[in-house]
Amino acid sequence: MHYEDDENYFRGYEWWLMVEAKKRNPNITLIGLPWAFPGWVGNGKNWPYDFPDITASYVVAWIHGAKKYHDLDIDYIGIWNEKSFNVKYIKLLRYLLDKRGLEKVKIIASDDLWEPITSAVFADKELYDAIEVLGVHYPGTKTVPRALKTGKKLWSSEDYSTFNDNVGGGCWARILNQNYVNGKMTATISWNLVASYYENLPFGRDGIMTANEPWSGNYVVESPVWTTAHTTQFTEPGWTYLQTVGHFTHGGSYVALTDQRGNLSIITETMTHDHSVCIRPPLRPYNVTVQNVTFNLKGTFAFISQLDVWHSKFDFKTDKTVLFQKLDPVKVIGGSFSIELDVDEIYTFTTITNGQRGTYPDPPPSAPFPKSYRDDFNVSGNFSEAPNFADQTGVFEYFTNLTDPGPHVFTLRQVVTQRPITWAADADQTISVIGDYAWHDVMVSCDVYMEAVQTGGVFIAARVDRGGGVIRSTRGVFFWVYADGTYKITNDLRGLAVLAKGSAGTRARTWYTLTLRVQGNYASADLNGYSLWKNAVLLNPLHGWVAIGTSSFQLAQFDNFVIEAE
């Protein structure tokens, strides 16, 4: 909902992702958590709680739309990612969910630290009743006694966020077990699911797997996928952790879960310190050594005669890592079995017999972003974003320009006209990056159309050096034109490091072709094929992405985008 009267439940990729996930696993849990809100929700202020009824209605509309347009049931909803919570808002959200027939949708709070949410829950019975789950981020496998005393479900509702090599796989193995062993957290959620964004953006490859080359189709099933499988193929949401879990004498941990209908899954990990460090918080030193362990099955489990065995072994010396390999079943004799555990191993012992590693064809080979690239945006369809563009501030959507009788019917349009209620330090300008971060010599051309009279401003750029949460400090070579008839070349997104400026004769509601060439230490810029500026000396950055954007949150259109890189 970019604007208050604007509801569209087909924007972006996430509806498609949820639908596809449900096709593969109808029982998968769906959780929503706002990271930012449209600016209108805060009535122009960078705060979502001054008008809690508007914020709650906005969130509930999203939940309703998921069901109405995609038949998706959202199971849980959060408050505001790693930001302040508001007691009045949480109560109102619970009330509105119930009033709209969404009693089954449960609330998680507050997706930050254990405090102050734990104390707030103790102090307010109505708040206690409104919240189903206490969710924290990056707890380091630890909880606090006061949270345990609430009797609420405790979740690590965001965790991992670690480079997905084998150390990342080891991190994930350790915290999947120890979040329960140490902290009694019964869910651990990875941020992020799939690293499908340019690797040089912040948190590059911090996903369970990597699929960041849509132009080649290449993807990599990284080790955290198989670390995950050790738990998720042999349990389901609703299974119960047994209380007899803990740490092995010589390092590592074990958990056991049951469906309370006779099935049992035991997961062990013996990840050493240096091979399981996560991005945060710091991990204190500890030791793991080879050991023999014996498991004793009692009660209803004493009648189990054998368990399927799945095994992973991280080998950091000879790179002969084995991931999620099925071994021969282990015999359970007299209710017990023994196993030798080496370091950096994961085992699953389970009564579930349908585990599988699956098969899939080799992905297409990796390839760099095409050096010659063009997009005329002549597309109509459900996907609202142009391929390969990565919006860092603002939203760039396909647009059908019905008022233009000429060649610009289908365009890409920046559509956010008010600064959002932000999670991170978004820029004051909008920007979307594309291409190869290693590019240094490049030509970029694009037709541009400013819709804002007098205040309009658009740019094309090269050698753009950063994005994400540090987007405000982005540098590069930026070629701006403005609706007041001027142009500017700057070395930064903020527009303060001016390399050249002058008169361009540009105005709003007219199409112009901008061309920027950067080669070595020199750059030049053309407007409609006429040189505005050339051979200016550049020092930094030496390389980076190409980008398009606007000088503020305003409507503007882009068409016939072309890159030629050397």
Image: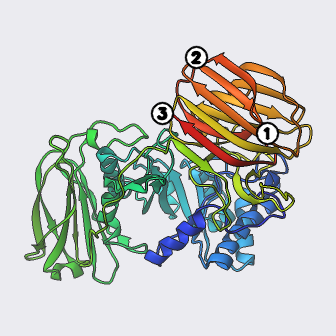
Occupied quadrant, residue 129 = bottom right
Residue 251 in the image, given as x and y percentages of width and height = 21, 48
Residue 325 in the image, given as x and y percentages of width and height = 19, 64
Q: Residues within 10 Å of mark 3 (few under 14, many from 20)?
A: some
Occupied quadrant, residue 259 = bottom left
In the rendered view, tell whether residue 101 sits above or below residue 34.
below
Residue that carries the numbered disc 1 in the rendered image: 552
Residue at 77% x, 54% y is: 408
Quadrant holding the N terminus: bottom right
In the picture, the disc for residue 539 is 2
Residue at 67% x, 24% y is: 524
In this view, the residue in front, 220 or 272, is 220
In the rendered view, tell whether residue 50 sits above or below residue 326.
above
Q: Give the Cα distance between marks 1 and 3.
A: 28 Å
**Mark with earlier residue (1, 3):** 3
Q: Is residue 530 visible?
A: yes
Residue that carries the numbered disc 3 in the rendered image: 438
In this view, the residue in front, 490 or 228, is 490
Residue 51 in the image, given as x and y percentages of width and height = 82, 56
Q: Is residue 246 left or right of residue 17?
A: left
**Mark with earlier residue (2, 1):** 2
Q: Is residue 124 left or right of residue 248?
A: right
Q: Is residue 546 left or right of residue 404?
A: left
Q: Give the Cα distance between marks 3 and 2.
A: 16 Å
Occupied quadrant, residue 379 = bottom right
Amino acid type at circle 1 is: Ser
Q: Is residue 461 left or right of residue 528?
A: left
